[in-house]
Amino acid sequence: MGSNDLKYEVSQNAYIKLVLHSLKHPTSAVNGVLIGRISSSNDTVEITDAVPLFHSQIPLLPQLEISLILIEEYFSTKGLNIVGYFHANERSDDFELGGVAKNIGDHICRYFPQAAILLLDNKKLEALKKSKSSSAIMQGCI
């Protein structure tokens, strides 16, 4: 089955965590990993949780590698894996996934080829503070 046939479902728990991490640090780049599994029917990546990682400068490789190893070890005991990556840029007018964020996403894709790479829209995040908008605050990059 090609990745074009896959659907991605983000649980409320995962969505809230990545939004709150981004809202808590509005002037910093934030990132984290998405946790989940492929459904038993093999047509949906179920994103059940999100683990915020950093909210300052995107880390050096050793910090990231250790974080990913620890997260994978913890969640694998629960039958879950790292299934994606989320990122929010520090500037509200920046709608591109930067080079370092792309590299992190590529690294995760090596281990989980169906990985979801999500870029949060800072303008929509800012609007969440003022209204109860129900529009998605992210775009899929992969």
Image (cartoon, rainbow, N blue to C red):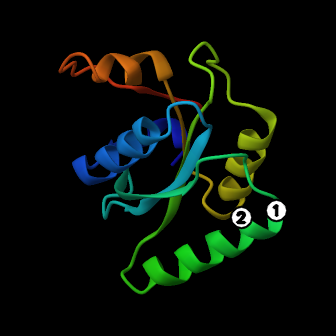
Query: Residue beneath label 1, please?
Result: 61
* Horizontal and vertical percent position of residue 59: 75, 55
Q: Which of 95 and 55 is in front in this view?
A: 55
Kind of residue at disc 1: Leu
Query: Residue beneath label 2, please?
Result: 64
Q: Label 2's element?
A: helix
* Horizontal and vertical percent position of residue 75: 44, 77
* Horizontal and vertical percent position of residue 30: 57, 43
Q: Nearer the viewer, residue 30 or 138?
A: 30
Q: Which of 24 and 13 is in front in this view?
A: 24
Q: How crowded is mark 1: few (under 14 residues within 10 Å), some or many (20 or more)?
A: few
* Residue visible at 29% across and 45% down in the picture: 16
Q: Relative to residue 80, is residue 9 depicted above or below? A: above
* Residue visible at 39% across and 20% down in the picture: 126
Kind of residue at disc 2: Leu
Are discs 2 and 1 less than 8 Å apart at CB?
yes
Image quarter for residue 99? top right
135 relative to 112 in the view: left or right: left
141 relative to 24 in the view: left or right: right
Give how far apart the Cα atoms at labels 2 and 1 are.
5 Å
